[in-house]
Image (spheres, grey):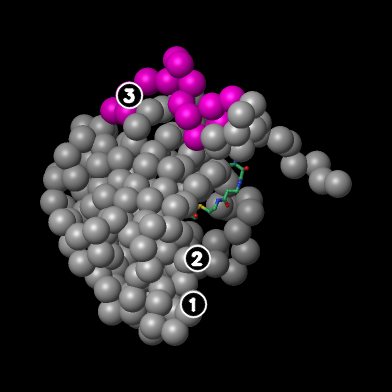
Amino acid sequence: MSNVPSRGAPPGSPAGPGPLTPPADAVPPVRHPDAPAPGEPLGAHYEHCFGCGEAQPHGLQLLARAGEGVRITAEFTVKPAHQGAPGLAHGGVLATALDETLGSLNWLLRVIAVTGRLQTEFVRPVPVGTSLYLEAEVTAVHGRKIYCTATGRLGGPEGPVAVRADALFIEVKVDHFIDNGRQEEIRAAMADPDQIKRARAFEVNP
Ligand SMILES: CCCCCCCC/C=C\CCCCCCCC(=O)SCCNC(=O)CCNC(=O)[C@H](O)C(C)(C)COP(=O)(O)OP(=O)(O)OC[C@H]1O[C@@H](n2cnc3c(N)ncnc32)[C@H](O)[C@@H]1OP(=O)(O)O
């Protein structure tokens, strides 16, 4: 059918613990010494990012802040452009908010990583106008695999949990983007000194 390799049993399957459970020899994550201080906003990693870019009018424009340890907090306000059912956020948009928040954790490790797996749980509907408050943390690292988890609450840190996710990110080199991205955007990113500066912050060679 396809040549995509199988990555083992699905999460929670009777065949085993599943790919979102760190292996026994996984290690705790280490916050990079130059990671932004707790409370500091991270800023967008790319201005056209649908999750965090300020140049995406219909995007989430999610704002993430460094937390203590290898933790992140983030906020985004659900806009009318994010509806699935009338007056309610689309589940895919909420998955994007979780994915973006989890992806931001890699700033604290100072690695570039992409989502390999994202398991979402939708606990409560999220109305348009809600400010969704997200918290995420890296739980373990195994080679290039980064295990992490997130929750999203309605209205603020004390609000009821509306969404949750467990995820596996895979560390990649900057070549991942150069080799796979459309040339038009890659060329523009490479010509943008701010983008290069952000890429350097990850200690990569643009
Ligand atoms: C000039 C330009 C400047 C650019 C600067 C850029 C800076 C930007 C900064 C930050 C950007 C971050 C953007 C965040 C956006 C939010 C997050 C997203 O939405 S990301 C988009 C969605 N995700 C993808 O598009 C991935 C698509 N998938 C892939 O490309 C590959 O499958 C990839 C890279 C994930 C893995 O491929 P392999 O060939 O590199 O890795 P293998 O060697 O197969 O795996 C390594 C280990 O990981 C496990 N693994 C890999 N994928 C897995 C999976 N899906 N499930 C379970 N395990 C997996 C494998 O079993 C292996 O484990 P064992 O080391 O043997 O223990």
**What amino acid type is highlighted by mark number 2?**
Gly
**Residue 61's image quarter?**
bottom left
Task: Give the spatial CA distance, label 2 vs label 3.
Answer: 30 Å
Q: Are marks 1 and 2 in contact (CB under 8 Å)?
A: yes
Residue 84 badge: 1
- Tell me: 130 left or right of 112: left
Circle nearer the N terminus (2, 3): 3
Residue at image mark 2: 92
User: Residue 80 lies in magenta, yes or no?
Assistant: no
- Which residue, given by chain and number where applicable, does mark 3 sit on? 28
Picture quarter with ligand 1: top right
Q: Is mark 3 within 8 Å of ligand 1?
A: no
What's the CA distance linking mark 1 and mark 3? 38 Å
Mark 2, Cα crowd under 10 Å, few <14 / some 14-19 / many 20+, is few
Three-letter amino acid code of the residue under disc 1: Gly
User: Going by the image, does 203 lie left or right of 65?
Assistant: right
The structure residue drawn at horizontal position 25% and vertical position 42%, both measured from the top left corner, is 71
